[in-house]
């Protein structure tokens, strides 16, 4: 079913055993090309210091709360609405330094599984981001910006030639943060099979049609489109719709228009 669910229903509280994520912590999307998680960190919690293999790229949207990230020797603050691209292969982790939940929308593209690799040592080092020091002042290169400032309007005149504007474009991961005005609707299209595409609604409502099946999406809803499926998105409401659209796998995205 292409409709995965709402971010509030997909979130899970992070826990770990023996220095690694505890078994049974679910992924919203888990394919050979994409992994998506909605991770909740309680105040003061941070996972083990870890890295992933270099055949993937990892992005974040801080959906709620505030945190402190320790990443490849640098430490920096992140807040609600921040969009990040993690340094490929870098050791990293994030601590919830706020008073409420920190909810991280985590999306990875490339060759999956992404792996969870700990640093050498027995036990492996796991520095507390609040005590490690070396705080990096803004602008931090890994923080791409705030989601509200990164939204690009849909352009019907150029979409078939240029696609939608990209916020992230790597060999493993592409991200587009787009707004549709009422009535906006690109033509029916599909992408090559060696990728996965997903859309997270940020605000407003969107009708998503996948192989003839219409889904009505609202804020926080996540839809998944495997490569090769015909699909179309349109704003049939009277208000603007803004959404995250991202793809992982063998990139760049190649599009066939119907």
Image (cartoon, helix red, strand yellow):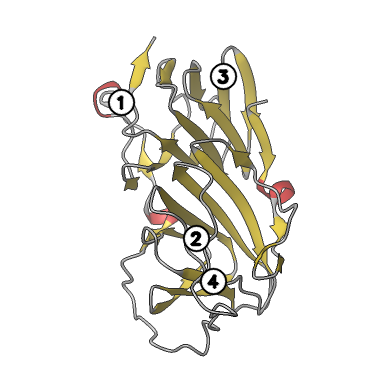
Q: Give the total of numbered labels.
A: 4
Give the distance between the C-alpha atoms of the residues marked 3 and 4, in whole angstroms.
Answer: 36 Å
Look at mark 3 in the image and give the residue it sits on: 210
Look at mark 1 in the image and give the residue it sits on: 159
Look at mark 4 in the image and give the residue it sits on: 94
Confirm or deny contact between disc 4 and disc 1 (CB under 8 A). Answer: no
**What is the crowding at mark 2: few (fewer than 14 residues within 10 Å), some, or many (at least 20)?**
some
Rendered location of residue 245, percent (x, y): 46, 38
| Residue 44 circle label | none
Residue 116 seen anywhere in this rendered image of the structure: yes
15 or 163: nearer the eye?
15
Based on the displayed image, in which of its 4 quarters is residue 171 positioned?
top left
As drawn, 182 above or below 222:
above
Rendered location of residue 57, percent (x, y): 41, 50
The mark nearer the N terminus, 2 or 4, is: 2
Residue placed at 34% from the left, 81% from the top? 137
Residue most extreme to the top:
258
Would residue 226 be found to the left or right of residue 43 on screen?
left
Look at mark 2 in the image and give the residue it sits on: 81
The mark nearer the N terminus, 2 or 3, is: 2
Disc 1 is placed on an element classified as helix
The mark nearer the N terminus, 4 or 1, is: 4
Give the distance between the C-alpha atoms of the residues marked 4 and 1, in whole angstroms.
Answer: 37 Å
Residue placed at 44% from the left, 37% from the top? 247
């Amino acid at each position: 079913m292409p409709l995965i669910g709402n971010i509030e229903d997909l979130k899970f509280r992070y826990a770990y055993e023996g220095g690694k994520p505890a078994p049974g912590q679910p992924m919203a999307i888990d394919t050979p090309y994409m992994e998506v998680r909605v991770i909740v960190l309680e105040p003061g919690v941070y996972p083990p210091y870890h890295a992933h293999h270099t055949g993937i790229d990892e992005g974040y949207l801080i959906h709620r709360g505030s945190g402190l990230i320790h990443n490849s020797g640098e430490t920096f603050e992140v807040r609600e609405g921040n969009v990040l691209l993690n340094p490929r292969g870098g050791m990293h982790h994030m601590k919830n330094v706020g008073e409420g939940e920190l909810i991280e929308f985590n999306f990875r593209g490339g060759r999956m599984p992404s792996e969870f690799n700990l640093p050498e040592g027995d036990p492996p080092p796991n520095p507390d981001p609040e005590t490690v020091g070396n705080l990096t002042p803004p602008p931090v290169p890994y923080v791409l910006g705030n989601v509200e400032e990164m939204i690009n309007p849909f352009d019907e005149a150029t979409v078939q030639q240029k696609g939608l504007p990209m916020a992230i474009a790597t060999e493993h991961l592409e991200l587009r943060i787009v707004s549709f005005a009422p009535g906006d609707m690109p033509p029916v299209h599909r992408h090559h099979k060696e990728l996965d595409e997903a859309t997270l609604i940020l605000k407003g409502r969107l009708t998503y049609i996948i192989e003839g099946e219409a889904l009505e999406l609202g804020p926080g809803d996540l839809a998944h489109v495997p490569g090769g499926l015909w699909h179309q998105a349109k704003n049939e409401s009277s208000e603007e719709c803004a959404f995250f659209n991202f793809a992982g796998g063998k990139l760049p995205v190649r599009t066939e228009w119907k």
